[in-house]
Structure formats: C-alpha cells, structure tokens
Amino acid sequence: MAAFSKDINQGELSHHLARSLGFSTSPTATFHSPSSSNYGVSAASRTAASAAAKHLKPFATEDIKILLLENINQTGRDILAEQGYQVESLKTSLPEDELIEKIRDVHVIGIRSKTKLTARVLKEARNLIVIGCFCIGTNQVDLQYAADHGIAVFNSPFSNSRSVAELVIGEIIALARQLGDRSNEMHNGTWNKVSSKCWEIRGKTLGIIGYGHIGSQLSVLAEAMGMSVIYYDVVNLMAMGTARQVPTLEALLRGSDFVSLHVPELPETRNMIGQQQFEQMKHGSYLINASRGSVVDIPALIQAMRTGKIAGAALDVYPNEPAGNGDYFTDDLNPWCTELRSLKNVILTPHIGGSTEEAQRAIGIEVGQALVRYVNEGTTLGAVNLPEVNLRSLTMDQPNHARVIFIHQNIPGVLRKVNEILADHNVDKQMTDSRGDVAYLMADISDVDTATIKDLYERLESLSSRIMTRILY
Ligand SMILES: NC(=O)c1ccc[n+]([C@@H]2O[C@H](COP(=O)([O-])OP(=O)(O)OC[C@H]3O[C@@H](n4cnc5c(N)ncnc54)[C@H](O)[C@@H]3O)[C@@H](O)[C@H]2O)c1
C-alpha cells in the first residue's frame, strides 16, 4: 500500500488497482530466482522485487512484453500501453525466422490475418500466454497447439457487424436502381437514362437469412428505409421493430423482393442457395451475399440471372479468395469468374463488408481489452480455443488475496490434487471448465503471502497434468 500512496494520487488509484492484479507466470522467478526469470525483467527491478516484493505489485505489468504486428489499430495499442506493458508495434508481418526470434521473448502477441502462428512458430514461444487476433478469422493460428500449451487466443468476431449491414443497405438501393451499370456506362462515356425496372425500395420486402449480429442490424436499417422485413433463422429469435420470423427458408424466398444472406459457414449452409432455391424466389428479385462464399452456388446464380429470374446480385464473398490484392479475380481463382463479371446488374466487391475505419477501431478496443483482462485477471471470456472461465474481480479490500489459474490436461483426478494443494487456504470462489483435452481452473484464495504463493506455484507446477500455472496477486 505504501507504493500506492507514494507513487500515484487517489484519482489514479482505481486504475492502478486493476493493474495490481498483476501478472506472474512464475513467482519463483520474480521473488527468488532472477537468473531463471522468463520475464526479461531488468536486473535492477528483479533485485527490487526480491527486496520489497509487495511494493512492486502495482508495477508488475511493466514486465509484460507485447509484440504487435501488421499495424494494429491505435485503439488497441493505446489500451495495452496504458497498462504499462512494454509494447512493440510493427507495421508489417514478419518472415517466419524473424517471427521466431521475436516471439521467444514475448508474453503476448497481436496479429491480423497475414501472420501465421503455426506449431513450428509457437513451439519457440516459451513465454507466450495469449494471442490476440485483431481480426475476425483465426485460421492463421494453430488453435489446438495453442490450447494444448495453455496459450489463449482471442479475436473480434462482431466488431464489424454494423459496417456489413450498412454496405448491404447501400447495395439494396444500388441494385434496385442499377447504379453499378449506369456508373460503368458513364465511365465508358455512355449516357443511358432509364427508369424501366428501376425501383424504390420503400414498401418492398427484405428477406434476411440468419438473424444474428449482422442480420438484426440490417433489419433495423431496412425498416427505417420503409422496407418490410422477414427473416429465417434456425433459432427462434426476437424480432427487431416489426420484422417477422418465417418458419422455413422456402417461405422466406417466396415472400422476398430482396434476399440477403448472413449465416455462418457450416456444412448445412454450404450451397444453401442453389438452383432449387432460385426457383422458389420471386421473378425479378435480388440476391445479396456478404456472408461466406460457400453459401451460394454461383453457377446456379449465373443461370438464374441469365433467365431473368434474378434481376441483380451483390457478392462480397467467394468460394476462393486471393491472399493479396492484385489481378486475381479470374477463372484461375474460380472457374466462373469471367462469366460472372460479364453479367449486368451484378455488384462485385472484394470482401470489404467489414472493412471500415470504425470496425478497425472497434476491433482494436475489443481485442485489446480481452488481452488486458486475460493478462491481469485470467478471464477467458471470448477465447476461441480455451473454455470460457470468469470470476468477479478481486477488490482493494482483499489485499492478501491471490488468484490461482491452473491450465491442465482434462483427465480424471486433477481437481482432487489441486484442491489438496489449495486445502489449507480459504477458497473464496472457484470455477473450472474444460474444452476437449484442456481444462481451465480459476480460484481466488485469501490470506496468502509471497512465500505461500511461491509454495502453491511450485506444488501446482509439479503436477503431471499441468499445462500452465499462473498466480495473480
Ligand atoms: N463480408 C464481410 O466482410 C463479413 C464481415 C463479418 C462477418 N461476415 C460473415 O457474415 C456472416 C454472419 O455474421 P454474424 O456476425 O451476423 O454471425 P452471427 O453468428 O451473429 O449470426 C449468424 C446467424 O445465422 C443463424 N444460422 C446458422 N445456421 C443457419 C441456417 N442453416 N439457416 C438459417 N440461419 C442460420 C444463426 O442462428 C445466427 O443467428 C458470417 O458468415 C460471417 O463470417 C462477413
């Protein structure tokens, strides 16, 4: 407590309190064995830690090393830097050898889609406790390897929902008014003023397939534009505004002037819109897909457009998408690209549904906060590869409490052994959950001193089921 009053004013107290739930993968190293420290902490601070460990508590976060690659948004960088962590931020991804060199040293890495965290790379990441994917997808990370080694992975699946919904609204109007074609004609010097088969969207019916984060946002926006909204979802969901859930996909297709897809990529959603579904759609209706490329059978769409059954389509996602920008949208990528490109009133965009500055900022905040929560409090809510475990935060009036986190193999008998180790202490609260072969235990215990923490840590580390032990205090 002396350190609080000496180093920070009262206004900052609550902020530092969160930080005081500091980080220690290895109390042994922090308190007693500088040479074995895996923190990269300076010799001076280690000496100080040994001499006055309690005073150092609020500053433990300075030892956390974070590497951010691929130009992570400023919002995320700020959240991590504000914690006092050592943050190195690079604009690009790194070649594998350089990545391996750098990752050896860090506790946290933040990436986007270009950095591949394979088992080969992660094997070298001896201090790593958490990976932040500042994006939607996590395919670039070997999630199983990470879980098996107690490394949590977080992403941001829903930060760009609004961006996608807004794009779709724009496309509904653009298709109804054939804007893409008129604009192309003008770019080619042709004045072609037409009103035939151009429509207002007011009073038309939008059918939304998949009423999740994006679908429900779209519902609100579409109603505000005067559209009627119906939706189909495998789950019964409360309608926004006056939207109405319909019982079958067929009912949705038969009743909609515009159909917009917002389902995940699953075996059941693969080609969920194909020849049969196009036949069920209204003559002259429109299709929009900004979900996943596998959901629409594109050759069937091309056929439906040629017959006039479908009056226009907007596609943002494709079965095969190139890894980088360039002249890749050809038949080498997907065998029907040339044919699709030749169709009238088809808007083709390169998977930009979620690509806005706002979404990038929101992703920075969401993933940044998840990383801080995990580092400081061990909370795995939102982790994609570990069970989701959370306990309410320790507070200032619990100065001698410690939070024990024990990530272990999900095998019989572990909890008995862990609770034997914790048995001499008052366990205020405890939670454990498993996901596949990996289990995550979190327990808050009271009245512990640094010697006890060291003892607990060493005994937990000696259990054969142990994957990773962390004690936050
Ligand atoms: N174009 C882009 O840039 C972009 C950006 C973000 C998300 N997406 C994609 O958009 C899609 C929707 O994202 P979200 O965040 O709204 O997801 P979400 O998980 O919030 O919602 C998906 C909804 O689909 C429903 N669903 C699942 N299977 C279904 C089925 N067979 N039939 C009908 N409904 C079904 C679910 O119950 C859920 O309500 C995802 O595929 C996502 O990958 C694309």
Image (cartoon, rainbow, N blue to C red):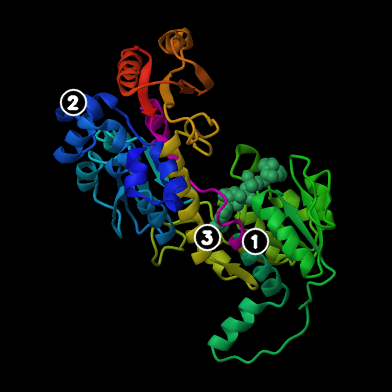
Between disc 1 and disc 3, the foreground one is 3
Query: In the image, is the residue at mark 1 within 8 Å of ligand 1 by its beta carbon?
Result: no
- As shown in the figure, which amino acid type bears the numbered disc 2? Ser
Disc 1 crowd, CA 10 A, few/some/many (<14, 14-19, 20+): many
Q: Inspect the magenta stretch and tell me whether residue 145 lies in it.
A: yes
Residue at 23 percent across and 38 percent down: it is 104
Give the Cα distance between marks 1 and 2.
54 Å
Q: Secondary structure under badge 3?
A: helix
Looking at the image, is mark 1 or mark 3 earlier in the sequence? Answer: 1
Q: Quadrant of residue 152?
A: top left
Give the foreground label among 3 and 2.
2
Q: Which residues are magenta?
A: 140-163
Expressed as whole percent of the image width and height from the top left, the position of residue 417 reads 43, 8
Taking the image as shown, residue 438 lies to the left or right of residue 244, namely left
Residue 454 horizontal/vertical position (percent): 30, 20
Q: Nearer the viewer, residue 167 or 65?
A: 65
Residue 297 makes an appearance in the image: yes
Residue identified by numbered label 2: 33
Label 2 CB, ligand 1: below 8 Å? no
Q: In this rendered view, identify the residue nearer to me: 205 or 422.
A: 422
C-alpha gap between disc 3 and disc 2: 44 Å
| Mark seen at residue 165 | 1
For disc 3, the marked residue is: 359
